Amino acid sequence: MRNRITLILTLSLLLSSCEFTINTNNSKNVDLGKMPKVESKTFENLYVADEKICESKELPITRFAIEYPNGYDVETPNDKENHIVMKKTIENIVVEELSIGNSTITLKNKNLTLTLIENVADNLKKQFPEMEILTVGKKEFNGEMNYLFEGKVDYSDFIEQGYNGVYKIMFVIPLPKENEELNAVMISMIANEQSEIKTFADFTNKGMIGKVYKTFRYIE
């Protein structure tokens, strides 16, 4: 039975969700074994996704954990698109945002990852024709080679939605290391001029995003 790879663009600014699909034989009905106990290592807050969470949110089955400190706006929506959205705001304007969405990319069909990243770039370009696309492909990020998208776009027309200025945008699909049945997630990150993040490399070690991204891990 053929299923779709469904990748939901998690950037909450977008007024309508963008869905990217590719046909695949990947099955969501898998047994990942006993869920181990997961504890915080760095920050006081911990979000853990497991089979039960994914089923309740109607998302592809995966397991991961991410930590975050107090002081940020955090949502765990039941929108069938996102696991968690974190925002750093200054005077009601989003300075940084990290969102974890979903996909049905696994180690078995990882050859399709680039196509999904290309779909992200194409769809964003259609919605924001003046967006500057800088990278679409495989690149080192946080010490690992990942498929990712990098771009810049002016969101000055979206002040009512809480966004203002030129934002660096990155979408990255970190793959699991060992478990071939685990669905990968897509992580989106944005930062404007008020952020400590001045380059795309800064997403790994500066600002709110730099702090929390390093705590992300799949539970394999």
Image (tube, grey):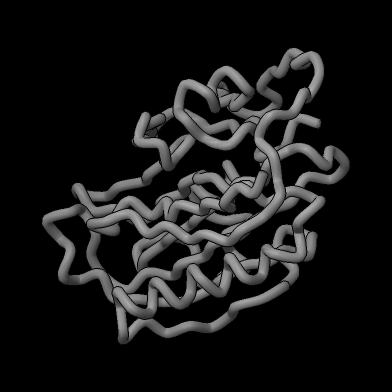
The image shows a total of numbered marks equal to 0
- Front residue of this view, candidates 192 and 1: 1
Q: Is residue 114 above or below residue 101?
A: below
Q: Residue at x 37, y 46 (%)?
A: 88
Where is the N terminus found, in terms of image quarters?
top right
Task: Name the residue located 74 percent from the left edge and 28 percent from the top edge.
Answer: 30
The residue positioned 72% from the left and 58% from the top of the image is 142
Query: Where does the image place residue 197, in percent across and percent down from the top left?
Result: 49, 63
Q: Position of residue 178 (x, y in %)?
A: 88, 41
Residue 124 versus residue 184 in the image, above or below: below
Q: Is residue 200 left or right of residue 85?
A: right
The correct choice, above or below, for 91 with respect to 194 in the image is above
| Residue closest to the far right | 178
| Image spot of residue 57 (x, y percent) | 45, 27
Q: Quadrant of residue 24?
A: bottom right
Considering every residue shown, the one lying at the far front of the view is 1
**Splitting the image into 4 quarters, where does residue 73 fall?**
top left
In the foreground, 139 or 195: 139
Q: Quadrant of the C terminus?
A: top right
Front one among 102 and 25: 25
* Residue occupying the point 70% across, 25% down: 41
Query: Percent position (x, y) of residue 132?
Result: 42, 84
